[in-house]
Image (spheres, rainbow, N blue to C red):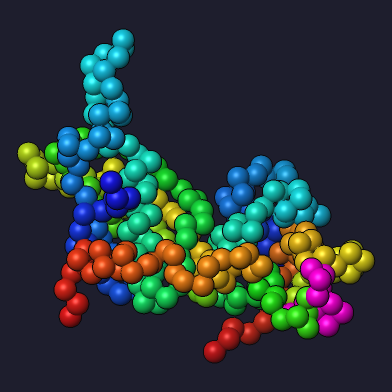
Amino acid sequence: MSRDEVLEKVRGVLVDALGVDDDEVTPTARLTTDLHAESIDFLDIVFRLEKAFGFKIGQGELFPDNINDPKYVKDGKVTVEGLALLRQRMPHVDFSSFAADPRLERVSEVFTVGSLVDFVGRKLQSPPES
Amino acid sequence: MRWLWIDSILDHEPQKRLVAIKSVSLAEDHIHQHFEAGPDGPAQPLMPASLMLEGMAQTAGILVGSVRDFSEKVILAKVTHASFERDVTPGQSIKYDAVIERMDDAGASTTGVISAFDHRSGVWTEIGRTEIIFSHVDKNMSGLDLPDHNFVFGENFRSILSQLLPARQ
């Protein structure tokens, strides 16, 4: 499946999940600040992506799950160790702008339509888990 | 009045499906407010669609909660679809047929079919469909100061539920 084909299917998922128009779903659009996704929409998006592409997405694989360990979050900010963990777990996301202001409340802002397309592309190329 | 919008559970396939019913009665106050007689015509008592959505949410929520023996705090997160094609009137019974489509640690997505039984004709007719997502709140709301006890499936609820559920095999 080409990147454009993946983008089209991801666009369909986001139009259904978020009630946005097709032309709003551009690769650079941010899920929260541009497409107005709320935290619970992430669960909906995960379920819809699984259905659309026929693979399973583990908790914390696409979006970060609960980060409670004080080693990773201190005073409301993601620590250097936490940032390294996020980068390791989520290679489909560009954390560079987040790293400059790593307040935990901002972490959902890093997700763009393009990062979802990258995630799906990686999943489609990786062998299915046994 | 208790916020219970199902009367009985007809069928339970663990981890998959739950079917509940509710009988609609003229004795219920809300029926008379929906819709009252007015300048435009006589009273037209109907079961509000919003309360049928609540009935389906309770049915599907019990199904999702039952998967982990009601240890999770299961809350309605999002109604992704709700459509109603016909009215339900007093004297009819409503059937809520809920199915789990997908479930993991974070929550579950469900689909539901709502039907109405007309006792005069003896026929069930589909009147609506729903898609509802539930969240396991402890797994998704990190940082919120939530109580430790299960405020969704408390002792009182579980006592009532034991009367609703069909006898366990």
Answer left or right for B129 relative to B11: right
Toward the viewer: B2 or A109?
A: B2
Farthest-out residue, top: B39
Name the image quarter holding the C terminus of chain B. Answer: bottom left
Magenta span contains residue B116: no
User: Residue extending furthest bottom?
Assistant: A130
Q: Where is residue B37, by image quadrant?
A: top left
Q: Is residue B87 above or below residue B128?
A: above
Extreme-right residue of the structure: A100
Q: Main SS type for the magenta part? A: helix
The spot of residue B20 in percent (x, y) is 24, 58
Report the magenta residues as a range: A74-89
Marks counted in the figure total 0
User: Image height check: is B92 above or below A62?
Assistant: above
Q: Quadrant of residue A76?
A: bottom right
Q: Position of residue A65 (x, y in %)?
A: 65, 73
| In this picture, residue A50 sits left or right of residue B62 | right
State whether residue A129 is above or below residue B8.
Answer: below
Q: Is residue B103 visible?
A: no
Q: Residue at x 34, y 43 (%)?
A: B51
Q: Is residue B19 visible?
A: yes
Q: Indicate left or right for B107 with B140 as reference.
A: left
- Residue beneath the point at 63% across and 64% down: B144
Relative depth, front residue between A8 and B15: B15
Which residue occupies 61% across, 65% down? B145
Q: x and y percent of residue A117 in the render?
A: 72, 64
- Residue B82 in picture, x, y percent from top left: 42, 45
Left or right of B72, for residue B106: right
Quadrant in the picture for residue B72? bottom left
